Image (cartoon, rainbow, N blue to C red):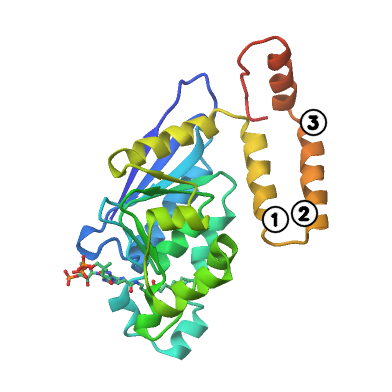
Amino acid sequence: ILVETRFPSDPSAKGGGVGLITLHRPKALNALCDALFDDLIHAVMAFDHDEDIGCIVITGSTKAFAAGADISEMSKQEFANVYKKNMFSQWADITKTSKPIIAAVNGFALGGGCELAMMCDILLAGSKAQFGQPEINLGVIPGAGGTQRLIRAVGKSKAMEMVLTGNRISAQEAMDAGLVSKVIDSEILVDEAVKMGFTIAEKSGMAVRMAKEAVNVAEEVSLSEGLRFERRMFHALFATKDQKEGMSAFLEKRKPEFTNE
Ligand code: CO8
């Protein structure tokens, strides 16, 4: 139900590889059953700890990125049980990774599928992608960011419309609303996402990690706290070899050779 592919880089480029994770549960449109989600978390964490990998890409099939949490598994649950085991709380682990994650979304990204995409750092949409929070049609509401991350991405009115009507939006609408950063032809979406992964992976791993952390802090704190955090991260990078290498390479008109230190 999961396919992992490593794209190593030139062995001299430390950390320059890309880890591609493909959700593969075609008979249920990649509905995120417990087993699939456990495998996904495991794969994401393994790539996050892998020194050779600098960026992670998560994708699904051309028909579905993921059609949500698994409805047949959820249908049997009772309040006491889901509350006591804090159902789905482990999904947030995706956001605790230090390396950037690109979601390459083809087809349906619905419910938990849309929420999974929003937990990633960059969203790229295939031209036929569709995003939605249809939980309202099942008598529930989003439970992994559909009422929180979505509003930050697309604003209140669009988020409210999606959450209350359950209607889906197209890739182009998602782009216009600011949910995704690019719409790409479905056929080449994954290749382009991996290519973008390589572009990121060849930078300094220290700077990339701190940039991700600083941008994500902006969603949590006030502007003055965020600016202070950003400036401290900026200062901290002057303690890295990569800052010395990056700036020397510029002045010497050569390509930098980052070592992620
Ligand atoms: N769960 C389980 N099975 C699913 C799901 C799902 N979410 N989505 C699709 N499937 C299954 C179907 O049951 C069907 O199985 P079968 O062939 O055995 O009948 C198979 O996938 C193919 O689906 P369809 O025949 O329905 O395919 P269509 O092309 O006709 O329709 C749709 C595609 C529109 C995507 C349709 O399948 C659909 O509406 N799916 C449900 C979408 C949905 O409601 N998602 C939200 C689920 S609730 C949720 O995600 C809560 C998240 C909370 C997360 C909290 C985390 C902390």
Q: Residue at x 28, y 77 (%)?
A: 72
Label drawn at residue 205: none
* Residue picked out by circle 2: 226
Q: Residue at x 51, y 78 (%)?
A: 86
Comparing 85 with 99, the one in front is: 99
**Compared with residue 129, is residue 233 higher up or lower down, i.e. above or below?**
above
Q: Residue at x 38, y 86 (%)?
A: 139
- Position of residue 37 measured from the top left corner of the image (x, y, whole percent): 39, 62
Determine whether the beta carbon of the residue marked 1 sits less than 8 angstroms from the nearest atom of ligand 1.
Answer: no
State the SS at label 3: helix
Around disc 2, counting alpha carbons within 10 Å, would you say few (fewer than 14), some (14 to 19), or many (20 or more)?
Answer: some
Q: Is residue 98 left or right of residue 36?
A: right
Q: Where's the N terminus, which quadrant? A: bottom left
Amino acid tagged 3 = Phe
Q: Where's the C terminus, which quadrant? A: top right
* Residue picked out by circle 1: 218
Determine whether the beta carbon of the residue marked 2 sits less than 8 angstroms from the nearest atom of ligand 1.
Answer: no
**Compared with residue 185, is residue 135 higher up or lower down, i.e. above or below?**
below
Q: Visible in this render: residue 179?
A: no
Marks 3/1: CA distance?
22 Å
Q: Residue at x 31, y 38 (%)?
A: 188
Q: Are marks 1 and 2 in contact (CB under 8 Å)?
A: yes
Marks 3/2: CA distance?
19 Å
State the SS at label 2: helix
Amino acid tagged 1 = Ala
* Residue picked out by circle 3: 238
